[in-house]
Image (tube, rainbow, N blue to C red):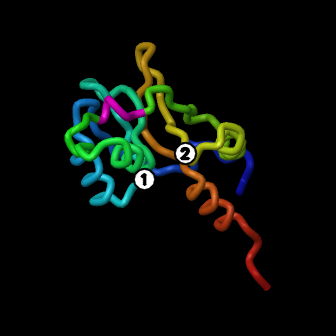
Amino acid sequence: MKRSRTVLESKRYGVFSCRPETTLLSAARQMVREDVSCLIVVDDAGYLAGILSRFDLVRACIESEAWESRLVADLMTAVVVTVSPETTMLEVANLLLEKQIHRVVAVREENGRLRPFSVISASDLIYHMLQDAEPAD
Protein backbone atom coordinates (compact mmCIF):
# COMPACT_ATOMS: atom_id res chain seq x y z
CA MET A 1 0.00 0.00 0.00
CA LYS A 2 1.43 3.35 -0.98
CA ARG A 3 1.66 5.11 2.35
CA SER A 4 1.09 8.58 0.91
CA ARG A 5 -2.03 7.66 -1.09
CA THR A 6 -4.97 9.67 0.19
CA VAL A 7 -8.54 8.63 0.78
CA LEU A 8 -9.56 10.81 -2.17
CA GLU A 9 -7.14 8.93 -4.46
CA SER A 10 -8.13 5.51 -3.16
CA LYS A 11 -11.85 5.17 -2.81
CA ARG A 12 -14.96 5.06 -4.89
CA TYR A 13 -17.54 7.67 -4.11
CA GLY A 14 -20.91 6.82 -2.67
CA VAL A 15 -22.27 5.32 0.49
CA PHE A 16 -25.24 3.15 1.26
CA SER A 17 -27.33 5.07 3.72
CA CYS A 18 -30.55 5.08 5.68
CA ARG A 19 -32.40 7.48 7.94
CA PRO A 20 -32.68 7.30 11.75
CA GLU A 21 -36.40 6.50 11.46
CA THR A 22 -35.78 3.45 9.22
CA THR A 23 -36.81 0.17 10.84
CA LEU A 24 -34.11 -2.37 11.58
CA LEU A 25 -35.90 -4.85 9.31
CA SER A 26 -35.66 -2.42 6.40
CA ALA A 27 -32.03 -1.66 7.20
CA ALA A 28 -31.20 -5.39 7.38
CA ARG A 29 -32.87 -5.98 4.01
CA GLN A 30 -30.86 -3.12 2.47
CA MET A 31 -27.57 -4.48 3.85
CA VAL A 32 -28.29 -7.91 2.40
CA ARG A 33 -29.49 -6.50 -0.94
CA GLU A 34 -26.43 -4.25 -1.33
CA ASP A 35 -24.04 -6.81 0.23
CA VAL A 36 -22.59 -4.26 2.66
CA SER A 37 -21.61 -4.60 6.31
CA CYS A 38 -22.89 -1.20 7.42
CA LEU A 39 -25.18 1.66 6.52
CA ILE A 40 -24.32 5.30 7.05
CA VAL A 41 -27.16 7.02 8.89
CA VAL A 42 -27.94 10.47 7.51
CA ASP A 43 -30.41 13.19 8.40
CA ASP A 44 -32.94 14.83 6.06
CA ALA A 45 -30.22 16.99 4.49
CA GLY A 46 -27.80 14.10 3.96
CA TYR A 47 -25.45 14.96 6.83
CA LEU A 48 -23.85 12.29 9.00
CA ALA A 49 -26.00 11.18 11.93
CA GLY A 50 -24.42 7.80 12.74
CA ILE A 51 -23.54 4.34 11.51
CA LEU A 52 -25.33 0.99 11.75
CA SER A 53 -23.38 -2.25 11.38
CA ARG A 54 -24.28 -5.91 10.99
CA PHE A 55 -23.13 -6.40 14.58
CA ASP A 56 -25.70 -3.84 15.71
CA LEU A 57 -28.40 -5.89 14.00
CA VAL A 58 -27.19 -9.11 15.63
CA ARG A 59 -27.21 -7.36 19.02
CA ALA A 60 -30.77 -6.15 18.39
CA CYS A 61 -31.93 -9.68 17.59
CA ILE A 62 -30.38 -11.04 20.78
CA GLU A 63 -31.87 -8.25 22.91
CA SER A 64 -35.43 -8.41 21.59
CA GLU A 65 -37.69 -10.79 19.73
CA ALA A 66 -39.37 -7.75 18.18
CA TRP A 67 -36.10 -6.35 16.80
CA GLU A 68 -37.61 -5.81 13.33
CA SER A 69 -39.79 -2.91 14.38
CA ARG A 70 -37.11 -1.03 16.30
CA LEU A 71 -35.66 2.07 14.69
CA VAL A 72 -32.13 2.58 13.44
CA ALA A 73 -31.86 5.59 15.78
CA ASP A 74 -32.22 3.20 18.74
CA LEU A 75 -29.14 1.16 17.82
CA MET A 76 -26.88 3.25 15.60
CA THR A 77 -23.53 4.50 16.80
CA ALA A 78 -23.82 8.29 16.84
CA VAL A 79 -20.13 9.00 17.41
CA VAL A 80 -18.52 7.97 14.12
CA VAL A 81 -14.80 7.87 13.41
CA THR A 82 -14.33 10.07 10.35
CA VAL A 83 -11.50 11.09 8.05
CA SER A 84 -11.06 13.84 5.50
CA PRO A 85 -10.35 13.37 1.77
CA GLU A 86 -6.69 14.29 2.43
CA THR A 87 -6.14 11.59 5.08
CA THR A 88 -3.58 9.02 3.93
CA MET A 89 -4.37 5.34 3.79
CA LEU A 90 -1.56 4.78 6.31
CA GLU A 91 -3.37 7.10 8.71
CA VAL A 92 -6.60 5.17 8.08
CA ALA A 93 -4.80 1.89 8.85
CA ASN A 94 -3.44 3.31 12.09
CA LEU A 95 -6.92 4.57 13.10
CA LEU A 96 -8.49 1.17 12.48
CA LEU A 97 -5.86 -0.55 14.62
CA GLU A 98 -5.81 2.10 17.36
CA LYS A 99 -9.60 2.24 17.73
CA GLN A 100 -10.10 -1.48 16.99
CA ILE A 101 -12.76 -0.77 14.38
CA HIS A 102 -13.47 -2.18 10.92
CA ARG A 103 -14.14 1.01 8.97
CA VAL A 104 -14.05 4.81 8.94
CA VAL A 105 -16.33 7.24 7.15
CA ALA A 106 -14.78 9.77 4.79
CA VAL A 107 -16.53 13.12 5.05
CA ARG A 108 -16.44 16.64 3.70
CA GLU A 109 -17.24 19.54 5.99
CA GLU A 110 -20.07 21.75 4.77
CA ASN A 111 -21.36 24.63 6.87
CA GLY A 112 -19.94 23.11 10.02
CA ARG A 113 -21.58 19.72 9.36
CA LEU A 114 -20.21 16.49 7.95
CA ARG A 115 -21.37 15.05 4.63
CA PRO A 116 -20.29 11.41 4.11
CA PHE A 117 -18.95 10.48 0.69
CA SER A 118 -17.21 7.15 1.23
CA VAL A 119 -16.51 4.31 3.65
CA ILE A 120 -12.98 2.92 3.95
CA SER A 121 -12.72 -0.53 5.49
CA ALA A 122 -9.94 -2.93 6.39
CA SER A 123 -10.88 -4.81 3.19
CA ASP A 124 -10.12 -1.69 1.17
CA LEU A 125 -6.69 -1.48 2.77
CA ILE A 126 -5.97 -5.12 1.88
CA TYR A 127 -7.07 -4.43 -1.71
CA HIS A 128 -4.58 -1.57 -2.02
CA MET A 129 -1.85 -3.59 -0.33
CA LEU A 130 -2.25 -6.27 -3.00
CA GLN A 131 -2.47 -3.76 -5.85
CA ASP A 132 0.80 -2.18 -4.76
CA ALA A 133 2.65 -5.40 -3.91
CA GLU A 134 5.63 -6.55 -5.92
CA PRO A 135 4.63 -9.10 -8.58
CA ALA A 136 5.41 -12.73 -7.70
CA ASP A 137 8.41 -14.31 -9.44
Q: Residue at x 38, y 48 (%)?
A: 62
Give the residue type at disc 1.
Ser
Q: Nearer the viewer, residue 70 or 40?
A: 70
Magenta stretch contains residue 5: no
Q: Nearer the viewer, residue 131 or 71?
A: 71
Q: Residue at x 32, y 29 (%)?
A: 73
Q: Is residue 132 visible?
A: yes
Magenta stretch contains residue 73: yes
Image coordinates for residue 56, horizontal then vertical, percent = 41, 43
Which residues make up the magenta segment? Answer: 72-76
Q: Which mark is residue 37?
A: 1
Q: Is residue 64 left or right of residue 89?
A: left
Q: Earlier in the sequence, mark 1 or mark 2?
A: 1
Q: Residue at x 51, y 37 (%)?
A: 106
Kindly give the residue lying farthest to the top in the view shown: 112
Identify the residue under disc 2.
103
Q: Secondary structure at mark 2?
A: strand
Kindly give the residue lying farthest to the bottom in the view shown: 137
Q: Which quadrant holds the C terminus?
A: bottom right
Q: Nearer the viewer, residue 91 or 95?
A: 95
Q: Label 1 crowding class (10 Å Cα cut-off): few <14, some 14-19, many 20+?
A: some
Q: Is residue 14 visible?
A: no
